[in-house]
Image: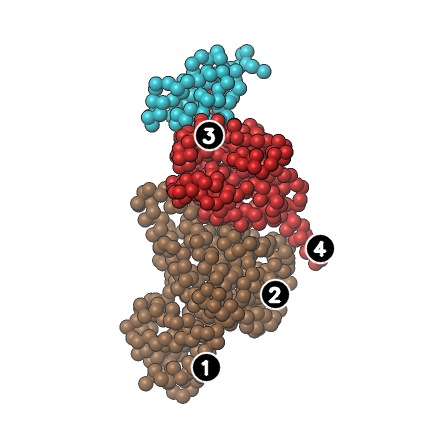
Chain colours: A cyan, B red, C brown
Amino acid sequence: MIVIDARYCKACGICVYFCPKHALEVSKQVNSRGFYTPYVVDASKCTNCHQCELFCPDFAVFIVEEEEGADG
Amino acid sequence: MTPPEHRLLKYLRREILPSTHCPGCGCGQVLNAFVNAIDDLAIDPREIISVTGIGCSSWIPSPYLKCDTLHTTHGRAVAFATGVKVIRPESHVVVIAGDGDLAAIGGNHLIHAARRNIGLAVFLVNNYIYGMTGGQVSPTTPFGTVTTTTPYSNAEYPLKIAELVATAGANYVARWTTYHIRKLIGSMKKALQKKGFSLIEIVSQCPVSYGRRVGLRDGVAFMQYFKENSVGRKKAASMSEGELEGKIVVGKLIERDRVEFSESLRRINEGVKSEG
Amino acid sequence: MQTDKARRYLSGLSGKVRFALGDEAAAYGALFAGCTFFGGYPITPASEVAETMARELPHVDGFYVQFEDEIGSIAAVIGAARAGAKAMTATSGPGFSLMQENIGYAIMTETPCVVVNVQRSGPSTGQATKPAQGDVLQARWGTHGDHEMIALAPNSVQECFDLMIECFNLSERYRHPVVFLMDGEIGHLRERLILPDLADLQLFPRGGFDPADEPGLIKPVQEYGKGQAVHITGSTHREDGMRDVVSQDVHERLITRFYDKIDRNRKNIVRYEERFMGDAETVAVCFGAASRPTLGAVVRARDAGLKVGYFRLATIWPFCGERLAAVGKQVKKILVPEMNLGQLAREVERFVNVPVIRVSKIGGVPHSVDEIHRAIVQETP
């Protein structure tokens, strides 16, 4: 599961760029700082590769791996 | 049900996030890599002392990383850190600062610390510019670049700082970019565990004070640029200097196993004791 | 704080009378005070301090590190001090100039440390091997910004030892760098040195408080390794150590407290020596190397019936303005013999309304008793 913490996002777009499954897109929502935050286009596309989490400069996106049926 | 939170926030002073670094700045990626490395190694943050200088990169652990911190004067972090490490060799003493700080004003301290092989892990964040002050030329800015203090053209050649430090005597030197995040985490773990002087030159992006003046307008553009222009060390060894022009050579540059400086000092002290 | 090995070694040195250089005595003073880190760089006439420390520190579980320059030296000294050690460096004018930025860092971070400056002829390379007293105002104001300073000046080899202990004590007590203003004359002088019993010394502990100091101005020392995520910075900061360079009142409160912790406690810090002041109509105010021939000149003048007093500063900073103001009301004239063009004299002038006569001598040759005696006779009715 991709979790986006909009408080910290600065709309750099790096998570969108790095997702190999294009599960993330820039939304039309702004956070309190005026940044257009990303959103999960299709949660089923996520493979828990953690790329978004590892490349985010602001700890604004991370993966929570579900207990059941989690990828190996 | 409490909302989930980032598993690494426990290492940070979360009440002051988000950081003051610009959108897309590589500094946040360096911090992310560092807390990943600490977490992977299960290092207790109480054992870390981070020592920084002046510049955006020096703001990576200070104040965001929740550990003992010594935020010092421009260029001198390595020298301060040497004093800390000699007195507290049991701590992980980590220096994080930029190319202007460590390679220009602090270049001499860096070279001699490597020569001395004092047990520091130095993360030199090289963004090719003096970013905090608005984009002045630095010793790593490519030849010909237009910056605020080379408004016509940079007439100086860039320094290969990682190679210089490797020659000076460090026990471990590697170079990665913020694009190579997993390799960077691996190198950071190595640097934290290796005795002696370790340097990782982390080529990073400054979109606001550098990138947008050279056609790399944001963090994503830099990710693409680093991906396309990096060359692995082994491949680079078979390329000419001309072919390597504009390329970023990444990988481990050197590894040695010489005795660490504060250990040498303690051995000498032991020896003096036995002479009565 | 000293290890058992250190105490055993130093106790073995106690009670012995040595014939030592001022530089060596200063080094022994540091060792007896509990210094375990010296970061330095060779420079005449201070190199003997470094050499003595290099030889002796291993005996007390301490460390001598020679750096690539004086800036690295003072940086490492501060780093070592923050890591828990009593730390020092020793240099002369050119190195002292290089160290100014980081001395300001030590002030801003309230880090105890001792900087020995064995003064030589300047400016610049000057007369590298000749003594002078020309760094008096630099010791006070060398680093940028508003700040106080503590600086002591010995005038004998024994004082190089005794006052070094004071330097370390004061630096710990006030969480402040202390400058030891030696000069090449005292530093390279050989005299009797008696090393005392360790038990007779009172060493101020790291983080201690003295009830004689005004409360609220001196804060607990932040120590690493205690899980408190201590944040030390040279930027303006709040009480919790976190940077705040925006709030006007935070900066004003911080810098004023740094000033006040020295200024409001100056009566606990200033040390001076007065002789023949009871009936004095003229007084010679002096310090360090120049005080030796000054005393000789005063004694000779008194033998001839002149009512001259002798006032020797052992602390240059904070300046003993209050006492000198009182002296200024008693005497008709003040002479200031010093090996510079009148730096101490400028300070004296600020506090008195009587004429202050400079008896300056530069060029690396100390005053003779004759020269100062002539000046006294000339100026005393």
* Residue tagged 3: B222
The crowd level at tag 3 (other Cα within 10 Å; few <14, some 14-19, many 20+) is many
The crowd level at tag 1 (other Cα within 10 Å; few <14, some 14-19, many 20+) is some
Circle nearer the viewer, 1 or 2? 1
Q: Secondary structure at mark 4?
A: helix
The answer to whether residue C322 is above or below residue B78 is below
- Residue B144 seen from this side: yes
Mark toward the start of the polypeptide (3 vs 4): 3
* Residue tagged 2: C14
Residue at the extreme right:
B275
* Residue tagged 1: C369
At label 1, which amino acid type do we have? Val
At label 2, which amino acid type do we have? Ser
Q: Are marks 4 and 1 on the same chain?
A: no
User: Observer-nearest residue: B19 or A42?
Assistant: A42
The answer to whether residue B226 is above or below residue C120 is above
Circle nearer the viewer, 1 or 3? 3
Chain letter for mark 2: C
The crowd level at tag 4 (other Cα within 10 Å; few <14, some 14-19, many 20+) is few
Q: Are marks 3 and 4 on the same chain?
A: yes
Distance from disc 4 to disc 1, alpha carbons, whole Å, reads 50 Å
* Residue tagged 4: B274
Distance from disc 2 to disc 4, alpha carbons, whole Å, reads 21 Å
Chain letter for mark 3: B
At label 3, which amino acid type do we have? Phe
Q: Residue at coordinates 32% horizontally, 49% vertically from top-left?
A: C252
- How many labels sit on residues? 4
Mark toward the start of the polypeptide (1 vs 2): 2
Chain letter for mark 1: C
User: Observer-nearest residue: B156 or C196?
Assistant: B156
Q: Residue C302's quadrant in the figure?
A: bottom left
